[in-house]
């Protein structure tokens, strides 16, 4: 088996195994050499047909790939101009990335050796919300055991590196292979099941917070729970509370709440409606490559990180620098202690009646509005974040607004119009956006650089990702219509099929929160950090 520290980790994949179709996204199908740049060859494609890296499914019809010339102009338009703030706390941007990694976690490299049977391959896919990206295959698995402490119940924690007067602290970084003693780049790599969760500092800090949450739940178990049962009992509590938080706090912030209520009350219409709740769900490519990439538009270019890096001093580029996958932790073996998150600057604790947990005036970070604009730094992604090579630097291949629709074209993803038609035929009352709405939007990307001919083509077969962003833009920054339906139904199905499921356990109610029946992300953080301001904001004001 490939050693953990040598396993590749890339945020985006360029080849997809779609059930009933095999591997799609071969170099011949890819625009601008994205697949070739990722080192994918026809020969490796043959191997992937026998051993796919992750199984996807197609919910909608096949679409068509738009010309590169159009996609280049649209990408430039999406990464040009000022972005608008929303009222969504900025932490939810990176919570969404954590959720995405949980949904598309391939635990086969973690749980199994080089000889993997077809049955094990299917079992190794995890399009569920069981926090496999946190737990791997559990403490008893020979490989995953490296993520756990000696008691086989608690997860390992990381320790920061002292930076100036800011002392080293335990539990504020993800655990790393080399710990605080290593200096080589390999030693900086995270010792966690999914290395994508160390792609940037913000998602890595969410992973570290989830480790804390799990360990606190283990500690809260009664003395009567036998040691051999402590992990599974804690995991069940953690997963159910995590799902409750996503249903009641995360989804209603990014999606039309009426859609959330309808799906969780009346069921799904397009994503495996009527499926056996205990069967392994399929991951819709329309979700993974299209609708759920809305978080890209929520990213800020500057953050008020903490008391050391306030008022926008935490540049987006530095969130990549201070991670093990995309950067080098600033040259330190673990996260420098002066980059620890101040959670008060990322989530509103006043919303759970904790006005005492508020940042200094003017220091709170809100997400950018969900619309068709991305901050300019996303036009020049670090090549480490997508598995690129030095030749990619300075080219359109580093522009996220170009990569997303190119990837969609590689798999012939349905257009927004095709998905709207599918939803209507399934009994979902959605309205297809008009050409004028797609062309003009509402304060989003300005498509005036497109020629008249291109402006006929693009709004007729609009890439699903752009279409969902334009829907949200026209809805004040909240997913609606096609986008909301795909996101909520996919997450509902992932919860339903999880080993521990709030969908299959309607009697469940959360209990670590201060208020019965309420469990938001802020409740999770308060519990994880022992309700102490000096842990939620260890660097002070």
Image (cartoon, rainbow, N blue to C red):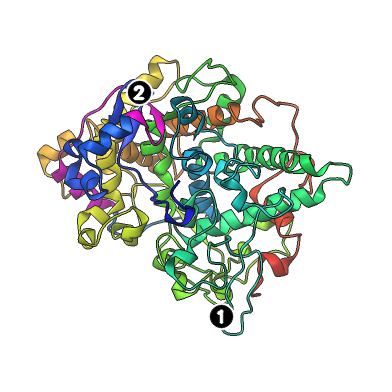
Query: Is residue 188 shown above or below 337?
Result: above
Badge 2 is on which residue?
60
For the residues bearing labels 2 and 1, Cβ distance under 8 angstroms: no
Crowdedness of circle 1 by 10 Å Cα count: few (<14), some, many (20+)? some
Which one is earlier in the sequence, the residue at label 2 or at label 1? 2
Residue 41's tag is none
- Residue found 25% across the figure and 43% down from its top: 40
Q: Where in the figure is residue 111, as x and y percent of width and height?
A: 53, 40
Crowdedness of circle 2 by 10 Å Cα count: few (<14), some, many (20+)? many
Badge 1 is on which residue?
163
Query: Relative to 173, is 33 on the left or the right?
Result: left
Q: Residue furthest bottom?
A: 165
Q: Quadrant of the C terminus?
A: bottom right
Range of magenta residues? 50-78
Q: Where in the figure is residue 303, as x and y percent of width and height?
A: 48, 66
Q: Is residue 538 magenta?
A: no
Q: Where in the figure is residue 16, as x and y percent of width and height?
A: 33, 34
Residue 252: image quadrant is top right
Residue 169: image quadrant is bottom right
Q: Where in the figure is residue 264, as x and y percent of width and height?
A: 60, 26
Q: Is residue 413 visible?
A: no
Residue 503: image quadrant is top right
Question: Please, what secondary structure does the residue beneath circle 1 have?
Answer: loop
Question: Please, what secondary structure does the residue beneath circle 2 have?
Answer: loop
Judge by depth and name the residue closer to the eye, 412 or 236.
Answer: 236
Q: CA distance from mark 2 to mark 1?
A: 51 Å
Judge by depth and name the residue closer to the eye, 333 or 516.
Answer: 333
- Residue found 55% across the figure and 53% down from its top: 192
Q: Is residue 349 visible?
A: yes
Q: Residue furthest right?
A: 224
Judge by depth and name the residue closer to the eye, 226 or 411.
Answer: 226
């Amino acid at each position: 088996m490939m050693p953990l520290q040598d396993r590749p980790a890339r945020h985006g994949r360029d080849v997809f195994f779609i059930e009933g179709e095999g591997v799609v996204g071969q170099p011949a199908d890819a625009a601008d050499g994205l697949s070739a740049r990722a080192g994918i060859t026809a020969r490796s494609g043959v191997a992937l047909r026998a051993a796919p890296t992750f199984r996807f499914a197609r919910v909608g019809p096949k679409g068509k790939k738009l010309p590169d010339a159009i996609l280049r102009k649209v990408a430039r338009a999406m990464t040009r101009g000022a972005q608008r703030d929303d009222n969504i706390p900025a932490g939810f941007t990176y919570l969404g990335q954590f959720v995405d990694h949980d949904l598309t976690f391939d635990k086969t490299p973690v749980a199994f050796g080089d000889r993997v049977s077809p049955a094990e391959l299917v079992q190794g896919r995890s399009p569920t919300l069981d926090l496999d990206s946190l737990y791997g295959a559990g403490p008893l698995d020979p490989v995953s055991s490296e993520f756990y402490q000696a008691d086989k119940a608690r997860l390992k924690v990381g320790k920061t590196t002292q930076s100036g007067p800011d002392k080293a602290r335990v539990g504020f970084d993800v655990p790393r292979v080399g710990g605080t003693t290593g200096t080589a780049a390999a030693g900086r790599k995270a010792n966690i099941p999914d290395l994508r969760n160390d792609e940037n500092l913000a998602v890595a800090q969410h992973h570290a917070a989830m480790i804390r949450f799990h360990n606190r739940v283990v500690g809260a178990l009664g003395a009567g729970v036998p040691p051999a049962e402590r992990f599974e009992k804690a995991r069940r509590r953690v997963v159910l509370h995590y799902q409750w938080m996503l249903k009641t706090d995360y989804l209603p912030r990014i999606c039309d709440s009426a859609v959330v209520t309808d799906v969780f009350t009346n069921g799904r219409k397009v994503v495996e409606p009527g499926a056996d709740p205990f069967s392994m769900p399929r991951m819709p490519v329309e979700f993974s490559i299209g609708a759920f990439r809305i978080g890209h538009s929520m990213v800020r270019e500057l953050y008020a990180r903490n008391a050391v890096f306030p008022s926008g001093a935490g540049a987006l580029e530095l969130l990549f620098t201070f991670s093990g996958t995309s950067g080098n932790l600033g040259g330190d073996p673990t996260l420098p202690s002066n980059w620890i998150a101040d959670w008060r600057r990322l989530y509103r604790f006043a919303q759970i009646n904790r006005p005492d947990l508020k940042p200094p005036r003017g220091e709170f970070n809100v997400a950018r509005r969900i619309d068709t604009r991305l901050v300019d730094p996303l036009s020049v992604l670090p090549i480490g974040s997508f598995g690129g090579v030095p030749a990619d630097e300075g080219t359109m291949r580093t522009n996220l607004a170009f990569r997303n629709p190119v990837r969609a074209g590689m798999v012939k993803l349905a257009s927004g119009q095709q998905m709207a038609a599918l939803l209507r035929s399934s009994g979902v009352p959605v309205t297809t956006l008009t050409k004028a709405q797609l062309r003009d939007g509402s304060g989003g990307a300005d498509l005036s650089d497109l020629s008249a001919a291109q402006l006929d083509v693009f709004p007729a077969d609009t890439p699903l990702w752009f279409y969902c962003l334009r829907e949200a833009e026209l809805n004040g920054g909240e997913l609606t219509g096609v986008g909301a339906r795909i996101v909520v139904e996919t997450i509902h199905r992932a919860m339903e099929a999880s080993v521990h499921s709030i969908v299959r356990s309607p009697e469940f109610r959360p209990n670590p929160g201060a208020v019965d029946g309420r469990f938001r992300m802020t409740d999770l953080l308060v519990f994880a950090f022992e309700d102490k301001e000096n842990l939620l904001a260890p660097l002070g004001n």
